[in-house]
Image (cartoon, rainbow, N blue to C red):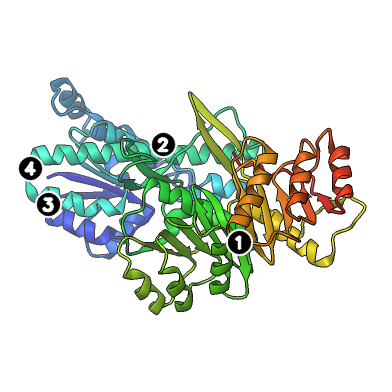
Amino acid sequence: MPRALLSVSDKSGLVDFARALVAHHFELVSTGGTAKAIRDAGLPVQDISEVTGFPEMLDGRVKTLHPVVHGGLLYRRDLPEHVAAVEAHGIGAIDLVVVNLYPFRETAARADVAPHDVIEQIDIGGPSMLRSAAKNFASVTVVCDPADYARVLTALDAHDEEGAMILRRDLAAKVFAHTAGYDAAIATWMQGQVSPDDPFGAALPLAFEKAQPLRYGENPEQRAAFYVERPGAGLAALTQLGGKELSFNNLLDVDGALMAIEPFAGQVACAIIKHTTPCGLAVAATPLEAWQKALACDPTSAFGGVVAFSIPIDTATAEAMSSLFLECIVAPSIDGAAAELLGRKKNLRVLVGTVPVRDAGGLDFKRVRGGLLVQDRPVVPVGSIPWKVVTQRTPTEAEAASLAFAWRAVASVKSNAIVLVKDGATIGIGAGQMSRVDASYLAGHKARTAGHDTTGALLASDAFFPFRDGIDQAAAVGVTAIVQPGGSVRDAEVIAAADEHGMAMVFTGARLFRH
């Protein structure tokens, strides 16, 4: 009779799976609460202590760490000396292991849990059994995810040894990835306990799970996939309504779109993104008005863009957007009529759901040859913006409100970045330029090309002006006030230029580079 060892924290599907194993003539061995759940269902089960001849002890810290368990998992059935050794010591085979681990991540994420309680959620016996079984996948089936119960039962019914071997190998690979991620979470938490104010430890343990394969990467010849820190995290929390599968570039742009509207929490905001940077961004009283104002910034570039809203989409907004080719629309929700209307566009992806604000205490990664660059995630400019008036003229109340909008808007634009704003909307964006004066020129040029009157516009720069030429360029198109970080060795020259033009200028003391 084959024997299965079951010891699970997540008991979803456990009883049905155990019942099916009994129907396949498996002897069940189990531990603690798992054994109780099986026994309460009226199924025969043997406690692990009966197998090892040793009681569970130390509040459950020691129960499966025993040669009888690991010998039954690890011995090679094809080596006579292995078979003889386990027979000599009275060790029986364990053919199937079902283990999922203590909920360490979930416990560690709770603010109300003391460190010693988190430590008790570090599973020792579970990973040990998983690794022993996975190493011996040639003979042992190992399951760490309840989602795989059906696959195992299908293989038992098939009586196909070649297919069963493929499944065992696949499940073993999943186990080693699972335990690696588990250990990475523990190591990260431990490093945080040692140096709570320094996230940059001597090692950087990372673990991501595959959320979905992608058709290709940035270009068709590049293979690609989407991985997440945990199931349902970040962009994976969004639900797609219709349209083609999301592409690599779609996901980058969706992330950029959510970044663009993030500083406008509590407002009605719309951002239109092309190549991860905004080509239009606005706040308004309604989503329709926000869309119209964002689109007016650069209607040419908006073609094929990704659009994000901070509030649900209504039918009027959906109808207005339906006349333009868009790749993706993302919003907290969408009403039924709007969803039906946009659903007629077969290639449009509509994504709904709430993606948590980026964790300011988290880390940002950029791949370089041979390694990773790691930094704190950028601070999102929300709430009041501290600044210092450095010119002779102080911004008017209306200018101050527009400058606050402009500062939040420029945060999501690729450097060198300049935005021109009016009436709660961008009217010209200069992005990704090699010089700041070129970015200033491009913002004004694009605004005028789109038919905007730039007289009285406000300007935000993501970094300081190294020379006065950017100020002169802004004055030439009618800018009346500027917000920028300051910090140039030529700040005095730049301030003097603003004073010459009668501009108001404020320094924030914070840079918003986005490389």
The residue that mark 1 highlights is 451
Q: CA distance from mark 3 to mark 2?
A: 33 Å
The image quarter in which residue 54 lies: top left
The image quarter in which residue 175 lies: top left
Q: Are marks 4 and 2 in contact (CB under 8 Å)?
A: no
Which is in the foreground here, disc 4 or disc 1?
A: 1
The residue that mark 2 highlights is 180
- For this orientation, the residue located farthest to the right is 392
- For this orientation, the residue located farthest to the top is 81
Q: Give the side of residue 143 with respect to residue 279, left or right.
A: left
Which is in the foreground here, disc 2 or disc 1?
A: 1
Q: Is residue 350 visible?
A: yes
Which is in the foreground here, disc 1 or disc 3?
A: 1
Q: Earlier in the sequence, mark 4 or mark 1?
A: 4
Q: Earlier in the sequence, mark 3 or mark 2?
A: 3
Q: Amino acid at mark 1?
A: Gly
The relative height of residue 130 versus residue 251 in the rendered view (above or below) is above
Dot 4 crowding, Cα within 10 Å, few <14, some 14–19, many 20+: few
Q: Position of residue 161 (x, y in %)?
A: 9, 39
- State the residue at coordinates (46%, 56%): 305
| SS type, badge 4 | loop
- State the residue at coordinates (68%, 55%): 420
Q: Give the side of residue 218 with respect to residue 30, left or right.
A: right
Q: Position of residue 400 (x, y in %)?
A: 80, 62
Q: Position of residue 143 (x, y in %)?
A: 27, 46
The residue that mark 4 highlights is 160
Q: CA distance from mark 1 to mark 3?
A: 78 Å
Q: Are marks 3 and 2 in contact (CB under 8 Å)?
A: no
| SS type, badge 1 | loop
Q: Amino acid at mark 4?
A: Asp
